[in-house]
Amino acid sequence: MPLQRWNLEGHKKEEVLAEHEEMMAFLVAVPIPGPPILRRLHLTTTRASAVRIHPLPEELQLVADVRSPHNHIRVADVSRLAASHPLAGARLLLLDGPGNIHSVSFPHCPLTRTYLDVFAAVPPLLPRPSLAVLGFGAGSAARALLHFYPDLSVHGWELDPSVIAVARDFFGLAELERSHADRLVVHIGDALEAEAVPGGFGGVLVDLFANGSVLPELQEAATWHRIGGMVAPGGTVMVNCGGGCVEAEEEGRDGEAVKDATMLAMAAAFGEGTVSMMDMDESWVAMTGPAACAPEEAAAAWKDRLPPQLRQYADMWRPYIHG
């Protein structure tokens, strides 16, 4: 999201500080619902636009500044003293001129208090313990997935090699790869050209944006047919669809309309009644698979298999109905 939009109007400082301390006191503390703090969070971009570089607000400390053929990459820490900031103590990956947030990392805590935590709830639904992450960023989703599910393998795709280099140097990705060498594979390349493992992945997580908007190819049913082909029978596809809170860098890419078009394309590809959706801090997430067909019946069984910190996300889905 544009950094100048980071505020907590009407939210008491002491309440936010108490919430943050509770989350950081435990390795896997339960995230506390709050205001929509990551409205423009996305994980993969195309070639960087010639846009004005927004300065960082005073509560952020610049750690690294890198330019690549694809992105203007900045790493910044949110001051722990910024008690009114919902991400106090976090490290952020910011890409391109507006400084959109692509990854979030808290020390000693795999959760982020964003829709990325919803991604971490998908493994109990999978027919086999393997996931593809299309739009890897600095590895926020992978970190939580590997933490909570010791039998899960993760393959991630990221377009920009400089983003992966920054993730290894500043977000602990190198250590994550060493610690889970048999379970984590990072691919550098176009996520839409990703290839499945033999037999297909148990599921695919999709978080692909370009210029501040959901990738245009994701509004095409043919793209979802290809992504669906990566999934084993009975598997699940989960995607960040953005929403009305997303402000694209390009004119004519209204976030709400793009979100609707993305879900419509998913329904066209996977079939009516096979897509469900939820709103996480004004960022819409959609899901296909058996749990999407009967969310109420599936929620109880799903919840029983989830870590306690993630069980709330099993109850937040509703069927997608076009129109």
Image: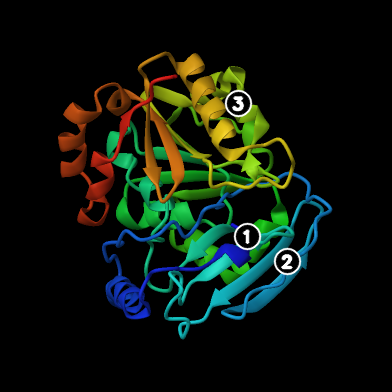
Query: Dot 1 lies on which element?
Result: loop
Dividing the picture into quarters, in which one does residue 53 lie?
Answer: bottom right
Graded by Cα atoms within 10 Å as few (under 14), some (14 to 19) or many (20 or more), the crowding at tag 2 reads few
Relative side of 310 to 38, left or right: left
Considering every residue shown, the one lying at the far bottom of the view is 81
Query: What amino acid is at disc 2?
Result: His
Residue 229 visible to the viewer: no
Which of the two residues, 13 or 220, is positioned nearer the viewer here?
13
Tag 2 residue: 54
Which of the two residues, 302 or 123, is positioned nearer the viewer here?
302
Question: Earlier along the polypeptide chain: callout 1 or callout 3?
Answer: 1
Between marks 2 and 1, how big is the CA–CA gap?
8 Å
Residue 303 shows which numbered tag? none
Question: Earlier along the polypeptide chain: callout 2 or callout 1?
Answer: 1
Between marks 1 and 3, how big is the CA–CA gap?
24 Å
Q: Are marks 2 and 3 in contact (CB under 8 Å)?
A: no
Number of disc labels: 3
Question: Which residue is at 41% across, 24% downward?
Answer: 232
| In front: label 2 or label 3 | 2
Query: Dot 3 lies on which element?
Result: helix
Query: What amino acid is at disc 3?
Result: Gln
Residue 153 visible to the viewer: yes
Tag 3 residue: 219
Where is residue 189 shown, x and y percent of the image?
69, 42
| In front: label 1 or label 3 | 1
Relative side of 211 to 185, left or right: right
Where is residue 179 shown, x and y percent of the image?
44, 62
Tag 1 residue: 2
Question: Which residue is at 32% across, 45% downward?
Answer: 121
Which of the two residues, 316 or 256, is positioned nearer the viewer here?
256
